[in-house]
Amino acid sequence: MAKVAEAKIRTESQKLFSQAKKYIPGGVNSPVRSFKSVGGNPVFISKASGPYLYGEDGKRYIDYCLSWGALILGHADLEVIKKLKEVISKGTSFGAVTKLETELAKLIVEAVPSIEQVRLVNSGTEAVMSAIRLARAYSGKTKIIKFEGSYHGHADYLLAKAGSGLATLGIPNSRGVPSDFTKHTITLDFNNLKAVQKTAEKYSKDLAAIIVEPVAANCGLILPQEGFLQTLRKIADKYNIVLIFDEVITGFRVCYQGAQGFLGVKPDLTCLGKIIGGGLPVGAFGGKKEIMKLLAPLGDVYQAGTLSGNPLAVTAGIATLKKLNNRKIYENLERKAKELCEAIKVISRKNRVNLEINYISSMFSVFFTKGKVIDYKTAQAQDLTIFKKLFQGLLREGIYFSPSGFETNFLSIAHTKEIIEKTLQVFSKLLKK
Ligand code: KE4
């Protein structure tokens, strides 16, 4: 019976995918959704609720991708949906100021240690682009340091040795980006302080910013080594470099104060996205008033967006952050993730499978490799063929992991103890093979 059902599921997605490919390049509106690196056709989703995705194929999946981390409350959270229903009948976009934007901005300023003022945009890419333009204007300098395997959205000059979809698809640098555009982007190894020190000394006169994912989550999850972020802070101070934390994933994920609150390092600018939109399109960048005041209309650093601060998206963000502002929520998330990850380690050891698992708070990645994964190079050493087998095995068993060995998985508050147990049973079954 199962074989027949599986075959039906495959044909269903196959049909939908070939239709999509007729009208949309690769059949997807974002490359990493294509399942290209994990094989098979992407699962077409019809609806979602709590920890579950429901495929058009009628199958239910426990979701560990959660729209790439955005849905920390789980899908279709009742509060968020209730608030959206209330606000949608009042109109969808005004292109004018609303008090809702002030409310979300206030929640972000009160939560994130480094943010004195914040501007809302529509995506993480826009948040990062704007923060870097601001850093260049504020410092009067041009060059930026980023880290190999990190992904900061698809602005031309950041598509240098980037992670996420580029790592997934093995695209070192995107075509269509003139080398002129990336000549001011210096890419170093994450956790390699010596390289940062040397580069900062060499280019100090022209280094505008260091941009870093304080917990790297786009080459699989990689933790900052002891003192790495603290030393970036010292180097930035010493050479007048703007330190930018790209917290599009880690913001309100690692804890309510973001990775900067959890790890105790304050950047000059912070980029946010995902969770602050509660699943609708919101990005944000913020930091010290003395930097933010350079933005038009106050100053002459231009940045704009038709739908920035959109009432629907902002409403979803407000409802999400209000519900998240509760230490118990993060303690529970952290406990469940620790239980899941530590148990997966035990299962892999029992089956003599070389599996490394990096996790922090409620985000984790598995790497089929021997030895610690501490940067992009060690992440690339993972066995992607085995990852692909795991991914497909999990999918067959109704578990939906982020479809790439270079992405991160997440828990939501809707992932109950029973869900963790079910996930561990499946891991036991699959790792035996
Ligand atoms: P968006 O423009 O996709 O909203 O955000 C770009 C971005 C910026 N910074 C970080 C740290 C990010 O992780 C992202 C986007 N994340 C990927 C997944 N890791 C988005 C998934 C996709 O590209 O479809």
Image (cartoon, grey):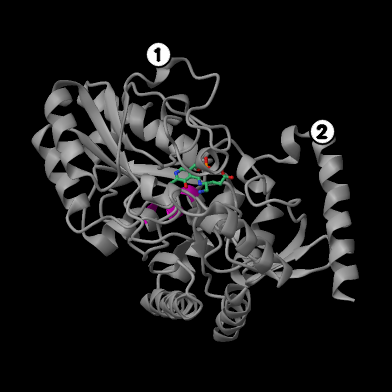
- Label drawn at residue 23: 2
Q: On screen, 424 above or below 395?
A: below
Q: On screen, 26 above or below 301?
A: below
Judge by depth and name the residue closer to the eye, 266 or 181: 181
Examine the image and state in which quarter residue 62 appears. Answer: bottom right
Residue 102 part of the magenta-drawn span: yes
- Label drawn at residue 180: 1
Q: Position of residue 389 (x, y in %)?
A: 64, 61
Residue 93 part of the magenta-drawn span: no
Observer able to see residue 295: no
Q: Position of residue 70 (x, y in %)?
A: 53, 57
Residue type at numbered disc 1: Asp
Judge by depth and name the residue closer to the eye, 110 or 164: 164
| Residues packed near mark 2 inside 10 Å, few (<14), some (14 to 19) or many (20 plus) | few
Part of the protein shown in magenta: 101-106
- Label drawn at residue 157: none
Q: Which image quarter is the N terminus in? A: bottom right
Q: Which image quarter is the C terminus in? A: bottom right
Q: Position of residue 325 (x, y in %)?
A: 40, 70
